[in-house]
């Protein structure tokens, strides 16, 4: 009952605008003004899929070099399906949200085994794949296959909330269905690919979160929020809860051969299966080197000489968490790591082949700069 009343509410809003004129104005603008992006040069479903996964929660400028490197290394869906996890984590290193590429890898292997390497072209089938939600399904099906299915992300919800004056809170998961109904009602069936991409592009370039450039907007005359002067008040979005903060200590430890100790994180949880320098969470104290010494001794039976002063401090922000890491240099005195499967001594050259989270890449960069 609630679903039908929501649908009617959205339909009433759609009926207030000239849909055909809106579609033509939007798509024509996209045809003329779209950015020259590498994933727009080829509508191959695999390539579209890769780009959409990379673009989730990541800026376009950041994604471009990653996308190019990824397709150079894994040019076909079969090449990516056959890759091992170390390879895919290394090529993804620095993009963050690593569950994205793990899910993509699992799903691609499913496509190769169950669908003969052809990405499914129906919403029902593609939605069964690991990590493929309504947005990714809509993006791949519309862009690669021309299916009239909406692709609703944060950009699109913002645009639609202003065009149709929708006041549903976009931070609430239940609101997504409302915006999907709006996308379906406005869909340009003659060119679903350009329609969905145009909504995304409009949100990225013109209908921005703050100070939208309404005077440059190709669909300004169709926009209810602009007509009422409330574009800056939309979309409605509740504030996120405050992020948690953690202080950590980390150590770059060398043995007598000049090899460096690295640790593989757990296969579950934050930054799963990435490599790092040994570290621990602490309550900030002055004598951090002593804490590290005790940690190495108790956790790994390693005796080390640790420099008293940290050589760098790294700040890193996740969506829900912030880290401040103080990193110390250390030299191994004694200890055998053979019984610890997660630990490994590697040369500096070998270290570059392992996938590290951004925070530990920064530690390594600072270490190299200060020891040259």
Image: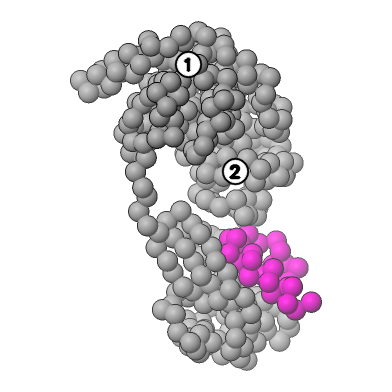
Q: Please tell me in which quadrant of the rendered image residue 310 appears.
A: bottom right
The 10 Å Cα crowd at callout 2, few under 14, some 14 to 19, many 20 or more, is: few
Q: In the displayed structure, would residue 79 be above or below residue 39?
A: below
Q: Are marks 2 and 1 in contact (CB under 8 Å)?
A: no
Identify the residue shown where x is 48% and y is 57%. Answer: 318
Q: Nearer the viewer, residue 307 or 237?
A: 237
SS at badge 2: loop
Identify the residue shown where x is 66% and y is 43%. Answer: 61
SS at badge 1: helix
Quadrant, the N terminus: top left
Residue 110 in magenta stretch: no
Could you tell me if residue 128 is visible in this image? no
Viewer-side label of 2, 1: 1
Quadrant, the C terminus: bottom right
Q: Please tell me in which quadrant of the rendered image residue 365 appears.
A: bottom right
- Which sits earlier in the primary sequence, circle 2 or circle 1? 2
Q: How many marks?
A: 2
Residue 356 in magenta stretch: yes
Q: Mainly helix, strand or loop, the magenta region?
A: helix
Identify the residue shown where x is 74% and y is 73%. Answer: 369
- Residue 133: x percent and y percent? 44, 34
Q: In the displayed structure, would residue 151 be above or below residue 315?
A: above
Q: In the displayed structure, would residue 150 be above or below residue 170?
A: above
Which region shows up in magenta?
347-372
- Residue 237: x percent and y percent? 37, 40
The tag on residue 222 is 1
Q: CA distance from mark 2 to mark 1?
A: 28 Å
The tag on residue 59 is 2
């Amino acid at each position: 009952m609630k679903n039908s009343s929501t649908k009617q509410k959205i339909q009433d809003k759609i009926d207030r605008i000239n849909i055909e004129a809106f579609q033509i104005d939007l798509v024509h603008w996209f045809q003329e003004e779209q950015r020259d992006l590498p994933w727009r040069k080829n509508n191959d479903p695999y390539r579209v899929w890769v780009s959409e996964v990379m673009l989730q929660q990541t800026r376009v400028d950041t994604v471009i070099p990653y996308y190019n490197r990824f397709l150079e290394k894994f040019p076909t869906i079969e090449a990516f399906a056959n890759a091992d996890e170390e390879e895919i984590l290394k090529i993804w290193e620095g993009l963050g949200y690593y569950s994205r590429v793990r899910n993509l890898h699992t799903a691609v292997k499913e496509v190769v085994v169950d669908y003969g390497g052809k990405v499914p072209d129906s919403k029902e089938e593609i939605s069964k794949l690991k990590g493929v939600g309504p947005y990714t399904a809509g993006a791949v099906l519309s862009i690669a296959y021309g299916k009239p299915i909406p692709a609703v992300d944060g950009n699109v919800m913002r645009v639609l909330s202003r065009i149709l004056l929708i006041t549903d809170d976009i931070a609430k998961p239940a609101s997504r269905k409302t915006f999907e109904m709006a996308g379906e009602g406005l869909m340009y069936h003659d060119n679903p690919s350009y329609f969905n991409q145009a909504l995304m592009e409009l949100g990225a370039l013109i209908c921005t979160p703050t100070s939208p450039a309404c005077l440059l907007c190709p669909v300004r005359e169709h926009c209810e929020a602009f007509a009422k002067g409330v574009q800056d008040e939309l979309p409605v979005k509740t504030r996120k809860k405050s992020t948690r903060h953690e202080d950590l200590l980390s150590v770059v430890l060398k043995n007598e051969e000049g090899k460096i100790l690295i640790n593989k994180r757990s296969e579950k949880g934050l930054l799963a299966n990435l490599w790092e320098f040994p570290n621990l969470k602490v309550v900030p104290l002055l004598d951090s080197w002593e804490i590290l010494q005790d940690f190495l001794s108790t956790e790994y039976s390693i005796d080390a000489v640790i420099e008293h002063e940290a050589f760098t401090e790294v700040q890193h922000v996740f969506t829900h968490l912030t880290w401040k890491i103080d990193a110390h240099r250390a030299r191994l005195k004694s200890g055998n790591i053979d019984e610890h499967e997660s630990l490994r001594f590697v040369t500096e050259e070998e270290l570059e082949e392992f996938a590290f989270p951004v925070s530990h890449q920064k530690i390594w960069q600072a270490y190299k700069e200060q020891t040259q």
